Image: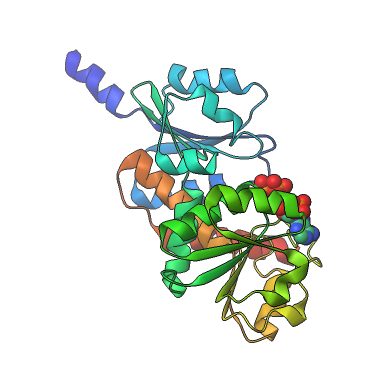
Amino acid sequence: MEERTLAVFESEPIIFALFGNPVGHSLSPLMHQAAYREMGLNAVYVPFCVRDLEAAVRGIRGMDIRGVSVTIPFKEEVRKHLDEFEEGSGRIGAVNTVVNEGGRLRGYNTDWIGFVRDLKEWMPIQGRTFGVLGAGGAARAVLFGILSAGGKPVILNRTAARGEALAKEFGCSFLPLSEIRALEADCLVNTTSAGMAPQVNRSPVEGRDLDKFTWVVDIVYNPLETKLLQDARMAGCHTGSGLGMFVHQGAEQIRLWTGAEPPVESMKRAVRQRLEKNEKN
Ligand code: ATR
């Protein structure tokens, strides 16, 4: 009898969740399910459009949810409901990943890791200078990533006060966005939402200001090639979309939740195919 109970218990699916509001357009469920299928894990990843965050976090313990991805608008707020944090999430001030260790909830930020992993696949970071466009939450993850990997960031922001405050906090320099021509940097990284669907004709920077950068990265992945990246490609720069960062932040979540190595290329393929299909329609 005892053996039978154990067998049933072992066949329980592992539950992962996404907490956000809204979540209908998220590509995380597609990406995670693709990974678990290939890994042969008996796991499901469920998107929840959360209305009461505190109750939802209680549900992680109550329903023994193994891990949760946290997205807009809860990345900052979720912290006050958790038990402990890894260093990056503290410095960035945002949690995008919760790990449930037997009822103790630990907050992580895998956005910065995703950014660094993707960048390292195609450009060096150590000792290079990066112009970072924007001073919001996404900029904080990118700045932490660049500094952790030995790069030198310079913040460029439209609103000087916000950019200066962030530069002071992270111990880096600041330049008003209007003075981008004075910037000497190897790589330009866009962390603003300018150019994200449906505003696909927008770019935070004039095309004529791009040719001095060897590399231009946009953390936006929808569309796959933003106006900024189109302009950068025309200006002869190497370009990288936000797809890689998105996939690598998800892959790191899977490592934290399962301890196993996720199939990064299959995850990337699944997300790319869906984005290409959406762009055609
Ligand atoms: P998130 O937390 O997702 O990064 P956010 O906090 O709204 O988003 O931050 C958006 C950042 O993008 C801000 O730094 C904003 O500049 P301001 O501080 O001047 O508002 C920047 N941003 C947004 N749209 C922009 C645009 N069209 N051109 C330049 N900067 C833009």
Q: Residue at x 44, y 27 (%)?
A: 65
On screen, residue 31 versus residue 5, left or right, reads: right
- In the displayed structure, 232 sits above or below 242; it is below
Q: Residue at x 29, y 23 (%)?
A: 8
- In the displayed structure, 246 sits above or below 56; it is below
Choose between 4 and 47: the one closer to the eye: 47
Q: Residue at x 66, y 36 (%)?
A: 73
Choose between 269 and 224: the one closer to the eye: 224
Question: Residue 83 placed where, x, y %?
Answer: 42, 23
Q: Which image quarter: residue 204?
A: bottom right
Choose between 89 and 181: the one closer to the eye: 181
Choose between 279 and 164: the one closer to the eye: 164
- In the displayed structure, 159 sits above or below 72; it is below
Confirm whether residue 90 shows in the render: yes
- In the displayed structure, 243 sits above or below 185; it is above
The quadrant in which the C terminus is found is: bottom right
Q: How many marks?
A: 0
On screen, residue 93 versus residue 180, left or right, reads: left
Question: Residue 268 placed where, x, y %?
Answer: 50, 61
On screen, residue 180 versus residue 18, left or right, reads: right
State how the image is colored: rainbow
Question: Residue 150 placed where, x, y %?
Answer: 41, 63
The quadrant in which the N terminus is found is: top left
Confirm whether residue 230 shows in the render: no
On screen, residue 82 versus residue 187, left or right, reads: left
